[in-house]
Image (spheres, rainbow, N blue to C red):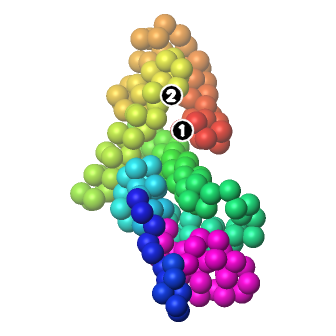
């Protein structure tokens, strides 16, 4: 992707180095030249990672802000590569944060699932949201060791009682309770370590 041509008063093309020097000398308006030249490139770097136009645009804005704040640390070893590295790091950080938020919400959701016999009062929207969260929780549960995954899925999504699970797994009710507790703890641990 070609950088935009930015010219000075005499019509000469202004280089990246000149733009950077102007910004560092206190000419904040010169940064608009960097934005004009590299904004589309930054978005092109971020979009394949984020895969959502609106969210990629937000991350591109964060990247440009980081470029502005970090210009004094730039070591004049390829500005385009330096900008791309910041963009990729911002996009990866954004994906991790989003995955952690989603995992945290789902882990909280597992803890909020009512015990059998508790009434659930919900409208169509709440029902749809609950089903979507269940689908996502089941997807995340695949990261658990099989015995914990099977126990969690059997209890929360197959509506089996502790006694039924214990009978199928050839264990005690107390062990089933322990496995459910441990499954939730493993989900939380994996989320905290950024594995979900």
Q: Which residue is mark 2?
A: 143
Q: State the predominant SS element of the stretch in magenta.
A: helix
For the point 70% across and 67% down, the residue is: 70
For the point 46% across and 55% down, the residue is: 45
Residue 73 x/y as whole percent: 75, 64
The question of residue 172 being in magenta is answered with no
Whether pointer 1 and pointer 2 mark residues with C-beta atoms closer than 8 Å, the reply is: yes
As drawn, which residue projects farthest toward the top?
170
How busy is the neighbourhood of tag 1: few (under 14 within 10 Å), some, or many (20 plus)? Answer: some
Mark 1 falls on what kind of element? Answer: loop
User: Between 45 and 106, which is closer to the camera in this rendering?
Assistant: 45
Q: Is residue 59 visible?
A: yes
Cα–Cα span, label 1 and label 2: 8 Å
Residue 30 x/y as whole percent: 59, 84
Mark 2 falls on what kind of element? Answer: loop
User: Between 1 and 171, which is closer to the camera in this rendering?
Assistant: 1
User: What is the number of the mark on residue 159?
Assistant: none
Residue 58 x/y as whole percent: 47, 67
Point out the image quarter for the C terminus: top right
Residues rendered magenta in the picture? 14-38
For the point 43% across and 38% down, the residue is: 137
Point out the image quarter for the N terminus: bottom left
User: What is the number of the mark on residue 196?
Assistant: 1
Compared across the picture, whether 83 is left or right of 168 comes to: right
For the point 29% across and 52% down, the residue is: 127
User: Between 2 and 91, which is closer to the camera in this rendering?
Assistant: 2
């Amino acid at each position: 992707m070609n950088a935009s041509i930015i010219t000075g008063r005499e019509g000469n093309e202004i280089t990246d180095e000149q733009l950077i020097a102007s910004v560092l000398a206190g000419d904040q308006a010169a940064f608009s030249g960097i934005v004009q030249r590299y904004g589309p490139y930054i978005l092109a770097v971020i979009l394949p990672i984020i895969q959502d136009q609106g969210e990629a645009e937000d991350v591109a804005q964060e990247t440009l802000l980081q470029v502005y704040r970090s210009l004094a640390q730039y070591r004049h070893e390829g500005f385009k590569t330096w900008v791309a590295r910041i963009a990729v790091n911002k996009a990866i950080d954004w994906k991790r944060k989003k995955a952690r938020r989603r995992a945290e919400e789902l882990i909280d959701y597992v803890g909020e699932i009512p015990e059998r016999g508790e009434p659930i009062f919900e409208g169509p929207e709440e029902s749809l949201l609950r089903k979507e969260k269940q689908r996502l929780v089941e997807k995340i549960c695949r990261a658990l060791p099989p015995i914990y995954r099977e126990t969690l899925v059997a209890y929360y999504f197959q509506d089996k009682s502790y006694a039924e699970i214990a009978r199928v797994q050839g264990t005690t009710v107390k062990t089933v309770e322990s496995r459910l507790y441990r499954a939730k703890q493993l989900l939380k641990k994996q989320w905290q370590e950024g594995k979900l």
